Amino acid sequence: MPANLPTHRLRPLSWRAVLKWTAISIGGIFVLLLLFLAFADWNWFKGPIERMASARSGRAVTIEGKLDVHALSLTPRASVERLTVGNPPWDAKRPMVRIEQLKVQVKLLPLFTGDVILPRVELVRPDVYLHRDAQGRANWTFENTRPSNAPAGKPPKLPVIRDFLVEDGRLTIRDERLKLKVDGSVQAHESVAQNQKFAFGIQGKGSINEQPFNLTVGGGPLVNLDPDEPYPFKLQMRAGDIRVESDGTVRKPFDLARLELNVHAKGGDLADLYYLTQLALPNTPAFELTAHVQRNVQIFKVTKVAGKIGQSDIAGDLTVDASRKRPTITGDLHSRQLRLVDLAPALGSKPATAGSLQAKSDAPKAATTAGAKQAKKDPNARLFPTSHLQVDRVRAMDADVRFQAGTIDAGSVPLQKVAFHVQLDDGLLTVSPFEFQMPQGALSGTARIDARGKIPQTKLDIRIKDVQLDQLKGKKPDAQPPLEGVIHGRAIIEGPGDSVHSLMAGADGRVSLILPSGEVNAALAELTGINVARGLGLLLKGNDDKAPIRCGVAQFEVKDGTMRADNVVFDTQDVRITTRGEVRLGPEELDLSIKGEPKKLRIARLRTPVEVNGHLLDPSIGVNVGKVAGQGAVAAAIGVVLTPLAAIIAFVDPGLAENENCAALLDSAKSGS
């Protein structure tokens, strides 16, 4: 080994020395940063800040005035003058936000635990413009198109603001989808002024679908606000004849995705709430409801629903899932006592009221009615409602809701229970099943409306099972039904149209009824014979003698809106009654001829039909002595009618073919007797 070389190696640095020099380096950088923050001119950074904010927001952000930052504090603060946030290219006529001066102060330490607490925010003359066009594009989102069912954007989560000052704030809302125009003001103060109800308040005034609109939101002082304590507020809204009042809380200020509200709402038509909620609710008479609403991000639990729609009570629970652009309603509703007339507006049989939000643009052109007296006064009166289905609303949401009523007030029709299941899926509306129960018998079926195309297509399949006809005699003490017995029936109707009237005007299908046995008013049976002395005499004397019905069958073929009475026969003890003619569903006109073939020789018998003509709401019934039918012609007509009876019975209920009376009628049809 050379003598001049050292005999030991260099000793490595200790961990204490490493930490020492690291701390000195970080401390030096921190001191330099503090010096920079203390003496830097922040206006140098306006350009980079504008470019970064514009790129992140997709909006042109400009700072025309001074930018000032005081960073050397546990509560740093910043001030910006003449801040402007532009709109997307499709709405570039005016900026989205203009603020004359914005001052913000933030607490540093809570940021490490994920809480953003702003000790003070001050806005001087803010001007906010919110706009959504008819296509659904909104300037407050980052979407330029509205997918049919894309995920919906989450509601904003705002920081806790302890001292919020808004001076001379302006709010402008233009929503073309909801036909909403609002010009409002926003004020916020540290405490409640002498002439004000709330320290924080939003007031808006304008119109919604050309009807008056007013909004007031108020809350308490924010100075003692805690991020873990709920913040209460009150809301009042008027839209047309709708009134909404609510006491609510923001469960964790100011996370608007988590709210609780106790809501009281009333108005002339539940469907008008579409303009406030974008939910396609059915048309109804005047309503008054209360509910508890709990929002958890995009899920709205609507519980403790209670109140009245018309004169019917309503209760239940609903859930609205707004996580996608097409919201979904699910739930169960029930009624202790339902008035059937309160369901009629859902089919379009009630014109919009004067204060309704639909009164201007959505109201049907032709008034609807349900009585012959009114039809005489109004030549445009219709049995089938003419109100149009709001196709755009049906396509805008999904639903799965069940409804049940315990007792029914249906006038002279005895109903004990009603239940139906409504489903809506991407423009396809089904009511499957629905059922109306009577003391003896039921009416049930399904309905399907396909609104996915340009013109809605509807199919109805309705069944009548074991309905006792003497239930339908009315409520007068001396009322007598014209027919007695148990009736069965089925109707299949389908066709295009966006209203009940347009559907019926172009419908195809068939309607079949079977009365295996029963009784008919003897005067009616004789009159269709017609035995002038006996038949008219019984009618004039009011005799309620009954003629037994061996079997009755009626079938109407429906083609292009015309019901043709091809197969109608009632076989009584003395007379076989047949009906020919048609019912034109578009103009709602009757043209029926009722004939009878006596089985016994009658004196003074007039061979002429009973004719039923006129409007469905105001028919005329009489004997036309000018139309005398020969005996051979009547017999031939009966033969034509009886031939397809087996097919009719199979369509309604194949088991009825085994009924003794109907089997006898089938045998007579086959033999031509």
Image (cartoon, helix red, strand yellow):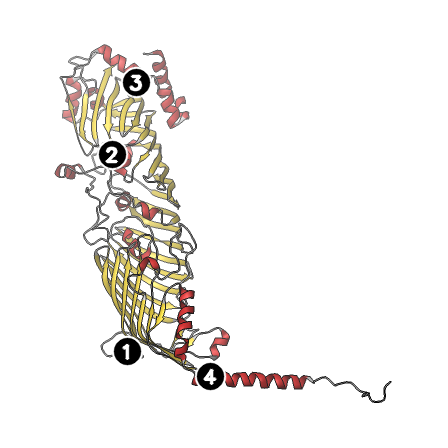
Residue 19 horizontal side relative to residue 282, left or right: right
Q: CA distance from mark 2 to mark 4?
A: 95 Å
Q: CA distance from mark 2 to mark 1?
A: 67 Å
Q: Nearer the viewer, residue 155 or 302?
A: 155
Q: CA distance from mark 2 to mark 3?
A: 29 Å
Q: In x, y percent, where is residue 588?
A: 21, 32
N-term mark: 2 or 1: 1
N-term mark: 3 or 4: 4
Q: Mark 4 = which residue?
A: 36
Whether residue 86 appears in this view of the structure is yes
Q: Mark 3 = which residue?
A: 641
Q: Mark 1 = which residue?
A: 192
**Which structural element holds mark 1?**
loop
Q: Residue at x 40, y 74 (%)?
A: 160
Q: Nearer the viewer, residue 423 or 611?
A: 423
Whether residue 73 appears in this view of the structure is no
Characterize the local packing of mark 3: few (<14), some (14-19) or many (20 or more) Cα atoms within 10 angstroms. Answer: many
Characterize the local packing of mark 1: few (<14), some (14-19) or many (20 or more) Cα atoms within 10 angstroms. Answer: some
Q: Locate residue 223: give its quadrant.
A: bottom left
Image quadrant where one finds the N terminus: bottom right
N-term mark: 2 or 3: 2
N-term mark: 1 or 3: 1
Which kind of residue does numbered mark 1 sit on?
Val
Q: CA distance from mark 4 to mark 1?
A: 41 Å
User: Depth-wise, is mark 2 or mark 1 nearer the camera?
Assistant: 1
Q: Residue at x 35, y 20 (%)?
A: 645
User: Depth-wise, is mark 3 or mark 4 nearer the camera?
Assistant: 4
Q: CA distance from mark 3 to mark 4?
A: 103 Å
**Which structural element holds mark 4?**
helix
Q: Mark 2 = which residue?
A: 473
Which kind of residue does numbered mark 4 sit on?
Phe
Q: Do callouts 1 and 3 mark residues in contact (Cβ within 8 Å)?
A: no
